[in-house]
Each structure stands twice: as C-alpha cells, then as structure tokens.
Image (tube, rainbow, N blue to C red):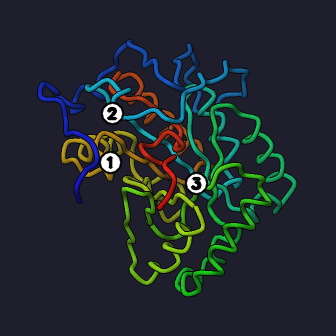
Amino acid sequence: MRKIFAGKSKNMTFLGMVVLMSTTSALLNSCNFKNEVNNDPVVSSQEHPSAEIVSSNMDDESVDPDKRVIYLTFDDGPNQGTENLLKILDKRNVCATAFLVGKHAYGSKKQKDDLLLLKQNPLVELANHSFSHAHNKYTDFYKNADAVVHDFDIAKDSLKLTDKIARTPGRNIWRLNNINVTDIKSSTLAADGLKKAGYKVIGWDLEWRPSQKMTLKGSHEAMIKKVDSIFMNDLEKTSRHLVFLTHDQYLRDADSINELDMFIEKLQKSNRFVFRKISQYPKINEVLN
C-alpha cells in the first residue's frame, strides 16, 4: 500500500547488529526518560516522573529523520499480567496504550484494582477494545454492524473513555482518514460502521504472539529483528511509525516478563527510536470523513 510519509533517510544504517550491542546512550523523547534501574525481571512499583506532555498534533516532521516511532500497545486488559506490564513500563519509564475490554474491568476485584492503576499511571493511555471482546465468537460478532458499534459504545461509557480510539477484537482493522484496511472482508460493514460512528480504528504492524502455554513466544532478539525487517522493508502502515501489539495476559511468568523488559531496553539503548502513545499516531486526530 502507498505510504503516507517519506521513505528512509539516505545515510541510514539501520538496526542490524547495532540494536544487539550494549550501549550507554539513553533515548530522550516524548514519553521516555531512561532511569537507573535494577535488572530484576519484575521490579517493585516505584514513583516515576510524569511523562512529558506532548501535543497531539505532532507530525512526522517532529521526528528526527534517523529515528523511528514505536507505539507499544497491549490488548485485553485489565487482565492477568496487567500489574506486571505496569511494572515494566515504570521500570523503563516508557509510555504505552492499553486497549481495554469493558467487561474485564469489572470481572473481579483484582481487575477493578488494576483498572485504577492503569488510570492513575501517566505513562499509560487508555483506549477501547470493545465491551464483550466479541464473546470470542468473532464471525458472528461482525455480522451485525449496529451491534458492534453498540458494544464499543457500552465500553466507552462504562470505562469513561474520553476519546474514540478503538481496536477490534480478533481483527487487524484500520479505519482512519488516510488508512483503510480490513484483514477479513466479512468484517467490512462493521468496520465502516465504527468509522461512521466516529471511532478511529487502529490495528497493528507487528504482534508478539503467544506460545501454547499463553506466554510470549520466542525471544526479544527475534522480535527486534522483526522490528528491523519491517522498517527496512517499509512494511509499516505509515512510514517510520510502527504499531506493536501484545497482550497483558502473556506477562504472567518470569521469562515473558523478562523478555518484554529486554525488548524495550534494547530498543531504548539503540538510541534509534521514539516511543509514543497511540493518540500521537500521524493524522489520527483528523476529523473522520
């Protein structure tokens, strides 16, 4: 598909082995200020400085041409692993977007407590991932476009979300003014209905998938190579901007927690990336046609 922004800088030697090298340079950007941290896979919660307030109108020109933007996004919270996710974000002082499922926010006292932690954390932005998560019956869910919109409306109201940024459960769908992608065509009417209702639907460029045990599959080194490959081959929906996805519930074991932590740390230390919340994605705040 045609990209929105200019291609890669001419003198760029991208990640490759550079990412895997241990460097001491810290990445200073809109919501990532590197702190001195310990190396424990799970760290205790700590007070952190508030993320710098960044204009929602930031565009590609505000990014150094030799850097790339990564949007860390996490689906299905609050859920098992949400608290561990927050500890990693606090440890690395990096921002992220949590796409929440409405019914999960009230499923248990622990989930209610985790929702409060998410709302109180300035590094985290909250977005809509439906109320029901399609009851995990995706084909049936997307047959009724009006019901899909209603489900997202319920989530928005029950979670008290102030924006209409959304991600569809079980589907990699994009509906912005400049991006229109539907991975499974039978979901087209529902996706169009969400856009008509004012929802800005965001999919993803790269997903860290689970193993059969519902833990993160593979290593952080492998994921960094995938990041490298996407940028090198210009496979992002928007050039120089990569939306990364994984799920809270995959962060329940020490190995998965450590792998995500190392993934973020290596990207930070490469000094080639800016981390932003999804509301800062290019053109997302344009009024939908």
Q: Which mark is residue 49?
A: none
* Labelled pair 3, 1 in contact (Cβ < 8 Å): no
For label 2, the crowd category at 10 Å Cα-Cα, with few meaning under 14, some 14 to 19 and many 20 or more, is some
Q: From the viewer's perspective, is 81 left or right of 157? A: left
Residue position for label 1:
238
Q: Position of residue 181 (x, y in %)?
A: 37, 66
Residue 202 position (above or below residue 113): below
* Labelled pair 3, 2 in contact (Cβ < 8 Å): no
Q: Amino acid at mark 1?
A: Thr
| Residue at 68%, 20% in the rendered image | 48
Q: Amino acid at mark 2?
A: Arg
Q: What is the distance, in whole Å, between disc 3 and disc 2 at their CAs?
A: 22 Å
Q: What is the distance, in whole Å, between disc 1 and disc 2 at their CAs?
A: 11 Å
Q: Position of residue 276 (x, y in %)?
A: 49, 35
Q: What is the distance, in whole Å, between disc 3 and disc 1 at their CAs?
A: 17 Å
Q: Secondary structure at mark 1?
A: loop
Residue position for label 3:
165
Q: Position of residue 130 (x, y in %)?
A: 65, 66
Residue position for label 2:
68
From the viewer's side, name the closer residue of 44 and 185: 185
| Residue at 31%, 28% in the rendered image | 67
For label 3, the crowd category at 10 Å Cα-Cα, with few meaning under 14, some 14 to 19 and many 20 or more, is many
From the viewer's side, name the closer residue of 104 and 153: 153
Q: In this rendering, which labeled residue sits more in front, label 3 or label 2? A: 3
Residue 189 position (above or below residue 99): below
Q: Amino acid at mark 3?
A: Ile
* Labelled pair 1, 2 in contact (Cβ < 8 Å): no
Residue 171 position (above or below residue 254): below
First-in-chain label (3 vs 2): 2
| Residue at 46%, 22% in the rendered image | 29
First-in-chain label (3 vs 1): 3
